[in-house]
Amino acid sequence: MSTQNSAERQSSEQPSAAGDGVAIVGIGIHPFGRTPDRSGREQGAVAVRNALADAGVAWSDMQFAFGGSHSAGDADTLVADLGLTGLPFINVYNGCATGGSALISARNAIASGAHDLGIVVGFDKHPRGAFNEDPATLGLGEWYGSTGMMVTTQFFAMKIQRYMYDHGISEKSLALVAEKAFSLGALNENAWRRKPLTVEEIAASTMINYPLTQYMFCSPGEGAVALVLARADRAHRYTSNPIHLKSVEFRSRRFGSFEVYSPWASPEMADGPTVEASRAAFESAGIAPTDIDVAQLQDTESGAEIMHMAETGLCTHGEQEKLLADGETRLGGRMPINTDGGVLANGEPIGATGLRQIYETALQLRGQAGARQVPGDPKTGFTHVYGAPGISACAVLAR
């Protein structure tokens, strides 16, 4: 990393075109889980300070910020903790794709030539228990909640039941996904669930909604992540190992797709937003799914990871059964997935989840993931989030 003073690096020249793209030059995280003595906003401030330090810059160097939170207040209130510099700080909220949406906004701010250097941050602090959404915020009538349909475990169970039937996926595969998550969480100092569990323990845990047991579901939690982004042609001013944001794409649902909080199902089946967002991300990056060395996929529950493996193009439908049985999605396999334990081991702080995936992928591409480092010098990474009411954000990274 350059020893040049951050103020010197930020010369008086005006922002201009983003050259050959956008790069991540600093990453920061606050541990996920439960931190009773620290608010969500305070966790966000910790993540921002860590990202700034990683890039060797100061808060006063930031030309813009995008940030989001679901339950912990407006992200722009972080200026009270970090400094009243007058920068444009724009709040972003888009469900589980909040982090991805903030990242898209930051990428565009730099790629457009409006700015050269900025930051994205996501944080949250959810109360214990299941998410308690109001149907009205999703355009649904009160009946949808009073009949119990807002309990999303039912949706995920119905969706994976159909998928398992159509593509020959066994219940053991569901347990294998969770077992991998907790084993990797045990290697991640920032994860919430750090106790390994066996396939047998997971399968035998309390049945929530068949075929998904207690340990096959994630839990709402806490945590924060921040990323410093810069013009790619200036990235080496801040770090010796920039991670290039080759693409980031967002898509919403189409008629005929069956998504979270869908009040009805169409006889005409259509692909979900994950299929279109991932396809667009790979096409924009000029990188194929087969070229990816490490991937982070939305694993709200075990079945989600299985379905998303195929929906993102990382494998074909039905191939997951053998890939999981053969250990191909583990660290030493040919398709390492959710190397930090995913949502299952880290929990789901909505504002931070998407950026956590980027953080982990950047760490892997830097070769700094420690005990959970993917072998073979990974050079490309892919991230994917999915959320209500049928949205998906995907990104491709490379060094």
Image (cartoon, helix red, strand yellow):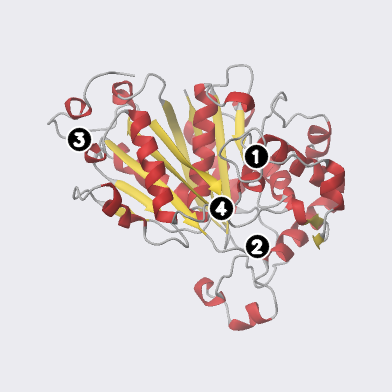
Residue to which mark 1 is pinned:
341
Disc 4 residue type (three-letter) = Arg
Question: Can residue 360 be seen at all in this image of the molecule?
Answer: yes
The first of marks 4 and 3 along the sequence is 3
Q: Position of residue 312 (x, y in %)?
A: 63, 41
Q: Callout 3, which amino acid?
A: Pro
Residue at mark 1 to residue at mark 2: CA–CA distance: 32 Å
Residue at image x 47%, y 61%? Answer: 70
Whether tag 1 and tag 3 are in contact, CB under 8 A, the answer is no
Cα distance in 3D space between marks 2 and 4: 38 Å
Q: Nearer the viewer, mark 2 or mark 3?
A: 3
Q: Under tag 2, what secondary structure?
A: loop
Q: Nearer the viewer, mark 2 or mark 4?
A: 4
Q: How far apart are the two marked residues, 4 and 3, measured between alpha carbons?
A: 40 Å
> For residue 256, which numbered disc appears in the image?
2
Residue at 15% across, 34% down: 14
Q: Which residue is mark 3?
A: 15
| Image: 140 above or below 11 | below
Q: Secondary structure at mark 4?
A: loop
Mark 4 lies on residue: 34
Q: Are marks 4 and 1 in contact (CB under 8 Å)?
A: no
Query: In 3D space, how far apart are the residues under numbered discs 2 and 3 (Cα atoms)?
Result: 44 Å
Q: Secondary structure at mark 1?
A: loop
Q: Quadrant of residue 180?
A: top right
Left or right position of 383 against 240: right
